[in-house]
Amino acid sequence: MPAPTPGCAVPRFSVIVPAYKVQAYLQESLDSVLTQSYPDLELIAVDDASPDACGSIIDEYAARDPRVTAVRLAHNVGLGPARNAGLARATGDYLVFLDGDDTLAPGALQAITDRLKATGSPDVLVYDYARTFWTGELVRNRLSHRLSEEGPASFRLADRPALLGMLMVVWNKTYRREYVEREGLRFPPGLYEDTPWTYPALLAAESVAVLDRVCVHYRQRRTGSILTTTSRRHLDIFDQYDRVFGYLAGRPELERWRPAVHRRMAEHFCALYADPRRLPRAVRAEFFKRASVLLRRYRATGRAGAPPLSLSRTDRLRHALMRLGTRRTYRLLSLVRAAALATGRAAATLGRGLRETALRLHYRAQRLLPLRPELAVFSAYWHGGYACNPAAIEAKLRELAPGMRTAWICDAEHEATLPRETVALRPGSAAYWTALARATYLTTNVNFERALVKRPGQILLQTQHGTPLKRVGLDLQDRPAATPTTDFAGLLRGADQWDYLLSANRHSTLVWEKAVPSSYTTLEYGYPRNDAFHRATRSDVLELRERLGIPADSTAILYAPTHRDYRRSRPDHLDFERVLRDLGPRFVLLTRTHLTYADSHAAPDPQPRLIDVSSYPSVEELCLASDALITDYSSLMFDYASLDRPIVIHADDWEAYEAARGTYFDLRACPPGAIARTQDELVDIFTTGHWQGSRSAQLRAAFRARFCSYDDGHAAERVVRRVFLGQPNPVPAVTPLEDRHPCPPAAAAPTPSPALAHVWP
């Protein structure tokens, strides 16, 4: 690789894009690189003697942007040698490979460089990808959980051998160029050229790190790729694994990895042999024979090294049969296994089918019976516990209409959260379907079963569970990666069943009526869950703080970030140990993980003044117990503003969040308090007192006037009187903002200091 020209700045990234017969996708691929928010890059586009317009497209980009280097090859050499041609021109600190029909996700390079900095410039950084289908569907890598950023920032592969079980491709990693030069890594000719690159790159690396973020969109063409075409060229796989084991033979210190690589090779051979699209019938016997030879040749006698795959007995048997060359037995086993799987699926399907049929008939029969006017069914958060707006409405309903019977849909582990007066309904049970068929009132903050058939006379109240800052409903049609479902028709069918939609403010009303349009009636009454902020007393707050273990005379900060649509594992935006050290002994942090990460949540390392409240059932009580809120883009800020206590926004990745999910307004232009863009700024806001200064109060007052105009402590009563008691006017009337007195915090606030200009918008 050439040395940088003296006097010229070395780019952070060299992005290498080979192109061959991808003219329909190449412009999108190149644009995805050049429009990155992190611009410190060089783009090396290699025309592999493509017979279409790839060469002229590359020339046009090189003429427009000085960061683009065009490389034209005289003859078609294949993907591996074309990448080598790009490598020969690379001068960047790190190498990024991108195929000519794939794209970088927005903000990917910024996220990568941030992670490289946070992990000490490792040799290799592994990041995630999503498959983008020709239908528009975007599906994230199913093994993305292996990219969890919890644990050491960088490590050796031996510390996380499961990474060896992920897709062994070159384009889901970035490589330090000096490391690649030192190891002499190059791509061989032929198919499966990634194999002799990725194994050595990971095995020899002194430091590896991971980034739990989708950085590449891996295009799945309708016509397939070269690896799914029927060709004799698939036999190239044997030469590639010969190269991998040849590399291991020259590095005795890596010999312990032989069993793991051998197992991965066996799995690769079996997968390729099982794919009817790849091997012509005439070469299948030859493939099996050559696979057997390699599996015997490179078999390890010991069990050194940690295998990255947990194999079933059937998989081990398949590998053994292929190694022994018993092709007929292997084929018989495959047929028997396929038959057994089919039989098992049929039996399971039959059992489920009989039960579901019985329940459907039961539900249909119950719908023939009269509705029960005294029965109201509630649910929250996908069969979760007693929480949010439905819980506040249910409690107020029992108070104002004691003759009503209420039932709550929840999984077994949440039954303990229900009040004694409310019946628990197990989802999918006969009692559950009876209640859905006979109840006059149905209330939820998400959605009921798609199978719900709303009867004439039934009233369905949709409360939602937050003021939308991020895009929702139909406004996500152009962001399929950010929505849990692309079934927008089903979304609208569900909305067509709503009689009432509860709105916290005018902003929410306008968003929901556009994003989920239907004929429901919007009740702009405020959020019942926030009524508690006006009912609670100082003694209630002191009792809550004692229950949570908050020391007396301390300032409790509730830290509640939202989830990220571009990653699965829980992001760590704060170094809790450092933050608490810098804040000093007076401050306590209450940390609450978003419910999206509940299944994978690991409590932070125990330390003084750090209390994990992720499993605490009531977020409203946590708000009351705290003196201030730190959040990023969570809708909790809108609720907390009605409590009229300080809010600090930690917006360290606004551009990435906006690119992935989209928002309805720029929070930085009208925040509810001080804004920190880094952890240092966040600490500065608290240590100098700006979190509760006069400027913070002014911003909060404006935010509160805009978004909390109805949260006066009587929202639940207005809902119950209108929906359940049939009173048409919103009684009681809304208390003016200036006349409200939400519960004050327990801790005495330190004396504020003058505001610092750099933290205000």
Image: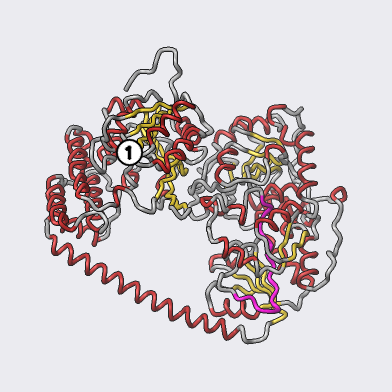
How far across and down, in percent of the image, does residue 605 sit? 50, 43
Q: Which residue is mark 1?
A: 51
x 63%, y 67%: residue = 379
Nearest to the observer: residue 11 or residue 538:
11
Nearest to the observer: residue 457 or residue 723:
457
Nearest to the observer: residue 549 or residue 55:
55
Question: In the image, is 588 to the left or to the right of 4?
Answer: right
Question: In the image, is 1 to the left or to the right of 11?
Answer: left
Residue 43 versus residue 378 in the image, above or below: above
Residue 596 versus residue 125 in the image, above or below: below
* Label 1 element class: loop
Q: Mark 1: give few (<14), some (14-19) or many (20+) Cα within 10 Å.
A: few
x 20%, y 35%: residue = 247
How far across and down, in percent of the image, does residue 618 sit? 65, 57
Question: In the image, is 157 to the left or to the right of 516?
Answer: left
Choose top left, top right, bottom left or bottom right for residue 691: top right
How far across and down, in percent of the image, does residue 159 sit? 34, 41
For the N terminus, the quadrant is top left
Q: Main secondary structure of the magenta part?
A: loop
- Please count the marks in the image: 1
Nearest to the observer: residue 308 or residue 104:
104
How far across and down, in percent of the image, does residue 256 sit? 22, 40
Which colour assignment does the render follow?
Answer: secondary structure
What is the span of residues highlighted in magenta in the rendered image? Answer: 453-468
Magenta residue check for 454 = yes
* Visible residue check, residue 421: no
* Visible residue check, residue 310: yes
Magenta residue check for 754 = no
Tell me the amino acid under the disc marked 1.
Answer: Pro
For the C terminus, the quadrant is top right
